[in-house]
Amino acid sequence: MNALTPARSSVHRLHLVLAAVIIAVLALLTAPMAASAATEPTESAAPVEPAPVGTEAPDAGAGADAGFTIGGIIRDGQEPVEGVDILVEGDGFSETGTTGDDGRWSVPVPAAGQYEATLDVDTLPEGASPRDPDNVTRQVTVGTTSTVNVLFPLGEATTSTVSIWDTIFTRLVYGLIFGLLLALAAIGISLIFGTTGVNNFAHGEMLTFGALGFYLFTTLLGWNVILALIVTLALSAAFGYLQDTVLFKPMRRRGVGLTQVLIVTIGLSIVVRYLYLFFFGGGTNNIASGITGNVSFGPVTITLVSLISAGVSIVILVLVGLFLTRTRIGKATRAVSDNAALAAASGINVDRIIRIVWTLAGLLTGLSGILYGLFRGVSWDLGFLILLLLFAAVTLGGLGSAFGALVGSLIIGVATELSTIIIPPDLRYAVALIVLIVVLLVRPQGVLGRRERVG
């Protein structure tokens, strides 16, 4: 007893430190809202995207505090047009934005509502003209998102014909990128299920935690991207560790059934998700990563951010595979996943392995949230919206199989994107679930199945 006391005391102190870190993060979250409430209680504390180069600075006022922006990009063909003025008016507000050398312009507006954006034709360069000279004013509704883009096409309209094969190839590339981003989070679900048997319905909130944390540090607080990435990943790992330490480990020791644990995860998901809504609001925001530009190869044009996200996902997935197959902890994780009682009898500390798995799952899922937030934008229910896709990927690949989760994620990603060729994009997630049903009817154990379990 006495020999164990210092170790238990050290673990207790570690738990207190981690809890203090989480509390500090929550304090950072509330700080912007408190500051906004002290100045303009009725206005949102959403962030303002920095104006592009060449945009006229807005007058001092409430626009920057409200966080709503109207903007866009003006090109003549494929060439950006510099020095073009766009007048934004509405409810007594009037401000002019000017395009920079990249053709971009933006105007912060004071609040949500209806506005008019009017292109100043006289500021267009010689030889450039609007495609529809009689319609140079756009009605703009601000409120559902922090940034609204307005288009003013120039020159003659052109019609391009894209072959069905180019469309399929483009959708396939998008699907692979989407599948890689899903895989990081799906592997976290698979590792947790494999070692504990728990289907964690709060896993989507772990993904949202990473996205919102990175958005907080980069966009709201203006931190360096690398520093923000390191801190967000550390907090995501701590978030996973604390979930096991505070909730699931005590329930395991008391022999709580998996059904009751499942209900606890659903309740945890609801509580955490609405905390996100309370602190960040219900809009969708973009992360100010500072990475811009597109990359084209063949018929495919993708953003540089998406390409980097896919590359990072591939590297991390390879490292996870090496961890599971080449390291002692990875092999112990596979042993616990196959038979926890036999692993304990052979001298493996099962509780320690489960704790490592929860921490690793938090890290991977937080990274998935960061990359997915860069890919699609950040919102309070980001993880919840794709949670069923994550479970579909895990089930499709084989429950408890880390590599199966990767295969299932790629299948789901490709299926959802290819389906948009023939059905409305809003129905693409339903197609993923149909694919899951069909595969399980043919092979109930999933693509890899129990015999191939590695995680």
Image (cartoon, rainbow, N blue to C red):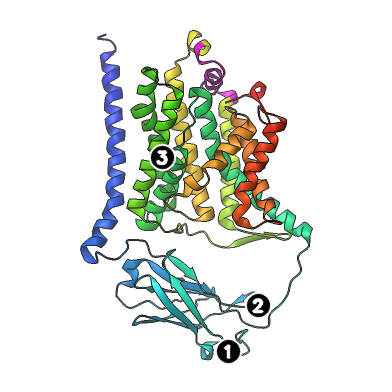
The answer to whether residue 318 is seen in the rendering is no
Classify mark 2: helix, strand or loop: loop
Q: Magenta residues, as a range?
A: 325-341
Residue 240 screen position, x and y as percent: 41, 34
Which residue carries the number 1 mark?
Answer: 134
Q: Which circle, 2 or 1, is nearer the viewer? A: 1
Residue found at the far left of this picture: 38
What label sits on residue 77 in the rendered view? 2
Q: Main secondary structure of the magenta part?
A: helix
Q: Reply yes or no: does residue 339 show up in magenta.
A: yes
N-terminal of the two: label 1 or label 3? 1
Q: Quadrant of residue 297?
A: bottom right
Disc 2/disc 1 C-alpha distance (Å): 20 Å
N-terminal of the two: label 3 or label 2? 2
Disc 3/disc 2 C-alpha distance (Å): 48 Å
Which residue carries the number 3 mark?
Answer: 269
Work out whether 281 lies above or below 72.
above
N-terminal of the two: label 2 or label 1? 2
Residue 170 screen position, x and y as percent: 70, 56
Are the two marked residues, 1 and 3, in contact with CB atoms closer than 8 angstroms? no
Q: Reply yes or no: does residue 276 show up in magenta.
A: no
Classify mark 3: helix, strand or loop: helix
